[in-house]
Amino acid sequence: MIYALIAILAGLLLLADTFISMRGFSGVIAALKPYETVIGIVALIAGVLHFWSLLGIALIMGGLMLGTRALTTVPNIGDELGSASNALTPFRGIIGGVTLVLGVMAFF
């Protein structure tokens, strides 16, 4: 259940540009935005722990995109993690939608 909650939060943050214009979601997005990096790192770790599931792979990709600022400071592999995040950026909406849907499905 905790992985579903992490996936829902990561999906909402990944789809923030889409949801910001919707009434009611702007407050949720504004409340989550300061914790974007933390949620991204937690999503990345949760995805690694559940690597053999579709939810785990979606959490890894979402965590890479949300935790970019923290991941680039990792010695020796920070540049590679940053470039992986930049390569996934054009697919941010798709990955966010998949992560959100999988999180909702895992929650119920």
Image (spheres, rainbow, N blue to C red):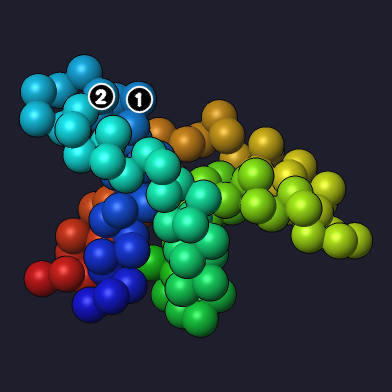
**In the rendered image, which quarter contains the C terminus?**
bottom left
Q: Which residue is mark 1?
A: 17
Q: Residue at x 26, y 68 (%)?
A: 4
Residue 81 is at least partly visible in this image: yes
Q: Which mark is residue 67?
A: none
Amino acid under disc 1: Asp
Kindly state the secondary structure of the residue where label 1 is placed: helix
Residue 16 position by quadrant:
top left
User: Residue 65 in the image: x percent, y percent?
Assistant: 56, 45
Q: Label 1: few (<14), some or many (≥20) within 10 Å? A: few
Amino acid on which disc 2 is placed: Ile
| Residue 20 tag number | 2
On the rendered structure, is 17 left or right of 47?
A: left
- Residue under the image location 51 percent in, 35 percent down: 91
| Coordinates of residue 58 in the picture (x, y in percent) | 45, 58
Look at the picture and state if 30 lies above or below 6. Answer: above
The one nearer the camera, 35 or 50, is 35
Q: Residue at x 16, y 69 (%)?
A: 107
Query: Separation of disc 1 and disc 2 at Cα?
Result: 6 Å
Residue 45 vs 75, above or below: the answer is below
Looking at the image, residue 3 sits to the left or right of residue 59; the answer is: left
* Total labels drawn: 2
Image position of 107 (left or right of 10)? left
Label 2 Cα crowd, 10 Å radius (few <14 / some 14-19 / many 20+):
some
Q: Is residue 52 visible?
A: no
Contact (Cβ within 8 Å) of mark 1 with mark 2 = yes
Q: Quadrant of residue 28?
A: top left
User: SS for tag 2?
Assistant: loop
Q: Residue at x 78, y 60 (%)?
A: 74
Looking at the image, residue 70 sits to the left or right of residue 21; the answer is: right
The residue at the far top in this view is: 21
Q: Image quadrant for the N terminus? A: bottom left
